[in-house]
Image (spheres, rainbow, N blue to C red):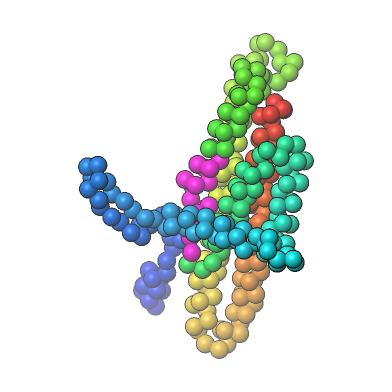
């Protein structure tokens, strides 16, 4: 009996396998010496996200129609929400295209990952941390271009005694760099935790459904819980995208106003 349980567990995929970056297509081309071209699931889904974003906005464009479509109303509502957030947080709409594009990129990536057997690119540390570090570098360059050398006063709180300046500069610098880690890890950890839980529950339900009528009836309660968690994951997809761009707006505001 114990051996049967062990053998059955060997055929259950690990819930973490869904986050692996795998090669889908490999091509060795003798161009400029020897270059290997590889198409991974990360690259494929990044391209699909781009196609979906462009396609959704193309569907929402109803210049030739008198009444707006449902997609157009949805896009206008999202645009109005992001526009309001940018005006309240930053006060300059010049950053609206970047914030709006970033929001839609993360939102579509999270929603696309909720489809069974798909891949969520925001569960990749390279994407999440790389995106947050790129934003931090851009924000730093923005602050330097606006304030020049005065930008470094951001790391020295006003009224700091001269003897405490080295210590406080070190603390503020670590806090400033930690923004990149916290911004990316927050997105990565929330999405990974939700998808891992769904994978474990779906595997459990699949085994229970194949166990007979009585077990099937008993499994209806966990199945209802599974549906509730799935709905929660859809909500988390929106929330994480909104929180990410909200924090980016606050970082841009700090770089502009040195707060």
Quadrant that contains the N terminus = bottom left
Q: Quadrant of residue 227?
A: bottom right
131 to the left or right of 57: left
The answer to whether residue 159 is visible is: yes
Residue 169 on image: x %, y %: 62, 20
187 to the left or right of 70: left
How many dots with numbers? 0
Residue drawn where x is 25% and y is 52% of the image: 28
Magenta run includes residue 152: no
Residue 198 on image: x %, y %: 56, 65
Residue drawn where x is 53% and y is 46% of the image: 128
233 or 251: nearer the viewer: 251
Identify whether 253 is placed above or below 191. Answer: above
196 or 114: nearer the viewer: 114
Quadrant that contains the C terminus = top right
Q: Residue furthest top?
A: 162
Residue 171 on image: x %, y %: 62, 25
The answer to whether residue 168 is visible is: no
117 to the left or right of 77: left
Residue 120 on image: x %, y %: 51, 57
Residue drawn where x is 68% and y is 38% of the image: 94
Magenta run includes residue 128: yes
Residue drawn where x is 62% and y is 63% of the image: 59
- Dominant secondary structure of the magenta stretch? helix
Residues in magenta, as a range: 118-132
231 or 201: nearer the viewer: 231
């Amino acid at each position: 009996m114990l051996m049967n349980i062990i053998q059955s567990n060997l055929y259950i995929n690990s819930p973490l396998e869904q986050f692996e970056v795998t090669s889908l297509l490999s091509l060795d081309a003798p161009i400029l010496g020897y270059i290997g071209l590889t198409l991974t699931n990360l690259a494929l889904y990044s391209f699909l996200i781009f196609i979906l974003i462009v396609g959704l906005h193309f569907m929402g464009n109803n210049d030739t129609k008198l009444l707006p479509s449902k997609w157009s109303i949805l896009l206008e509502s999202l645009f109005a929400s992001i526009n309001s957030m940018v005006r309240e947080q930053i006060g300059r709409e010049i950053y609206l295209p970047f914030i709006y594009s970033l929001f839609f990129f993360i939102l579509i990536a999270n929603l696309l990952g909720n489809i069974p057997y798909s891949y969520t690119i925001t569960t990749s540390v390279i994407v999440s941390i790389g995106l947050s570090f790129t934003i931090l570098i851009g924000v730093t360059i923005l602050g330097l271009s606006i304030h020049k050398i005065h930008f470094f006063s951001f790391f020295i709180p006003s009224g700091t005694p001269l003897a405490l300046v080295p210590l406080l500069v070190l603390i503020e610098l670590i806090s400033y760099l930690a923004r990149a880690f916290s911004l990316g890890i927050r997105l990565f950890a929330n999405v990974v935790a939700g998808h891992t839980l769904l994978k474990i529950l779906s595997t459990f339900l699949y085994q229970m459904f194949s166990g007979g009528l009585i077990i099937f009836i008993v499994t209806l309660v966990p199945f209802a819980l599974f549906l509730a968690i799935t709905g929660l994951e859809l909500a988390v997809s929106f929330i994480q995208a909104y929180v990410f761009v909200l924090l980016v707006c606050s970082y841009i505001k700090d770089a502009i106003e040195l707060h």
